[in-house]
Structure formats: structure tokens, C-alpha cells
Image: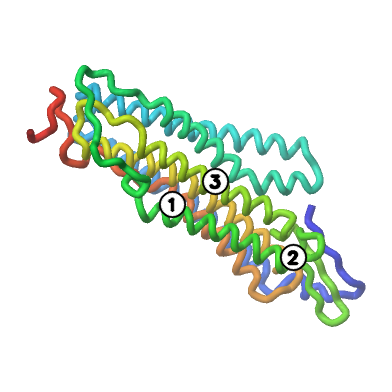
Amino acid sequence: MPIQTLAQNAPADLFVPAAYDVVWSIIVALLLAGVAVAVALAVRALARGAGPGPSLRALADDDPVRSAARRHAGIVAGSAAAAGVLTAVLAAQATTVVDGLAEGVLLGLTPALVGAAFLAVHALGERTWPRQRTVVRSASLQPRTVADVAPAGLRRLTWALAAGVVVLAAVGGLTAGDDGRSVTRVAGDVTSTAGPYPGAFYGVWLALGAVVLVGASEGVLRLVARRPAVALVGPAWDLALRRLSAHRVLRGVQLALALTAAGMLFFGGNAAARVGYPGAVVLAVVGVLLALASLAVLVRAAPDPDAVSGHASPHGAPAGA
């Protein structure tokens, strides 16, 4: 429950800044616009995939080896997304069971829990990747690393978001009140306190969740790099399929980390604005924008393995051989 303590005869405009309602109306408008943009991007991506003429993916479906590999990767990605949604539903139900301060901690950790379930299914899918069953097996003489399969930009963004959560937790811990979950402002003889605020009470758990999440993502990416090669395909296609898997892993982790950071900014800025800190509402606006940006990353098109050269032909030989 929000905490707010007001002194006697405190002027109302101290806790409700000028144009407060207008600012929050702008935030809601931005949120609705962002959702509309995300839906439009998703529809555009689906329409692009369903365009006229044969697509590279349709041509790849003629090859049973590549089709089976893509099917396994798709099942893993779909199962991971379903596990994340199920975890979110269970966490939402759990908030109705627990009460008091534990409810706030659980709510803050929900994105990290969703990301953990997402990564667990991906790890299981990589560990159960089909091994080669051909008479002659092939393997690359050069060992692959995480840097080879993970898109560098997405990987750096994932680490930056995790570092942002840790920094926000540290700042919240330094600026929060003695209880670690509220912020206080003293203006003359008036003292005001508001919460929830991402102080040490919440921040420690959120920072720990971010560190565990980014560490687990690196472990899953390592599994992607070391999984068995797809038989009877060119090394370029096999590497592209690994990059597709790594892209999906990082995209889900980034969504969880971005929503965690967005929640910290939103609730922190909201509490600080309610006690009268000037400009604090900007933090809440940044939190909303960050959440919208995470949705844009979620619908970003993944690399298509069949767009690379060197894939196998239906007869098992590399294309162009």
C-alpha cells in the first residue's frame, strides 16, 4: 500500500505539483501510443512473412534436415515463451495470496521470475538438441564461443540493462528512508513520506534477480555455442541457426531486465513526485518509455538462417558446391 505522511496544515500543492494531472495524462497517452506502435510492428512483420512468392523459409522446408532443425528451434522458443507467460500468471495469482510487504517484493521480482523460466526452457531445449545420426558425422575444427553466436549489440544491451538495474538499486538504497521502502522530504516544518520506493528493501532483491538473470543467459548462450552441429548442412547455415537461437534468448532476457528497470524508475519517480521533489516525474516518464522500448525489441525481426549462403541442398551437398 502506498505510504504518505502529511504534517498538519501542509499545503496541498506541495504534494501535488502543478500540472501533475496533465503530465500523467501525457504518460498514459504515450503508453497507449507505444502499444499501438508495437501492435503495428508485429502486424507488419507477419504481413512481410506472408508476402507473395516463395520465401527462403519455404524453400528451406523442402529440405527435411533444415526443416527438422528449425522445427526444434521453434518448439524451444515457443515453449520458452509459454513458460514465461505461465510464470507471469502464477506470479499474478500469488500476489493475491501473499499480503503486506511480500506482495511488493513478489511484484518487483515478477519480470526476473518470468525471465528465469524462459531461460530454463531454453537451456533444456539446448541440452536435448538432436545429435547427428548420419553415417559420416561432421564437426567444426574451430571451437565456437559465445561471441561467435551472440549478436554483439544485443549482448551489450543485455549487460547494460542489468547494470542499470544494479545502479538504480544502489541509488534507491542511498536515497530511501530508514525503512528502505519509502522516500522522505523535509521542507521547513513540513515532512512528507511516500512509497513504495525502490530502496534497499526492494532494491537488493531486484539487483540480485538481474545479476542471476544475466549470468543464466550467458550460460544458455554457452549451450547454444556448444550444441551438436546440424548434419548435412553448410557451416554458415548452422552458425546462422545458432545466432537465431541466441537472438531469441537475449531478446527475452532484455524484456525482463527492461521491465524491471522501468518499474523501478516509475515507482521511484512517482513516490518522489508525490513528496514534492521537482522534476521527479521525469523519471516516471523515462520508465514508461523504457517499457515501450522493450516491446519494440521484442518484436524485432530475428535473423533468418536461410538468408545466408552455404546452406545445404535437398541432396545434402552445400548449395553452390
Residue 269 in sight in this render: no
Q: Quadrant of residue 229?
A: top left
Eyeballing the image, is 131 above or below 105?
above
Please, what is the three-letter code of the amino acid marked with disc 1?
Ala
Residue 186's image quarter? bottom right
Residues packed near mark 2 inside 10 Å, few (<14), some (14 to 19) or many (20 plus): many
Q: Residue at x 68, y 56 (%)?
A: 203
Name which residue type carries label 3: Leu
Q: Quadrant of residue 263?
A: bottom right
Residue placed under numbered mark 2 in the picture: 176
Q: Is residue 189 left or right of residue 93?
A: right
The residue at 78%/75% (across/down) is 14
User: Residue at coordinates 66% horizontally, 72% vertically from top-left?
Assistant: 19
Q: Residue at x 60, y 69 (%)?
A: 282
Q: Which residue is mark 1?
A: 296
Q: Are marks 1 and 2 in contact (CB under 8 Å)?
A: no
Dot 2: element: loop
Of labels 3 and 2, the one closer to you: 3
**Residue under circle 3?**
213
Secondary structure under the numbered disc 3 in the rendered image: helix
Secondary element at tag 1: helix
Q: Residues within 10 Å of mark 3 (few under 14, many from 20)?
A: many
In front of the other: 139 or 314? 139
User: Residue 75 or 126: which is nearer the viewer?
Assistant: 126
In this picture, residue 200 sits left or right of residue 285: right
* Mark 1 crowd level (few <14, some 14–19, many ≥20, 10 Å Cα): some
Determine the CA span between mark 1 and mark 2: 32 Å
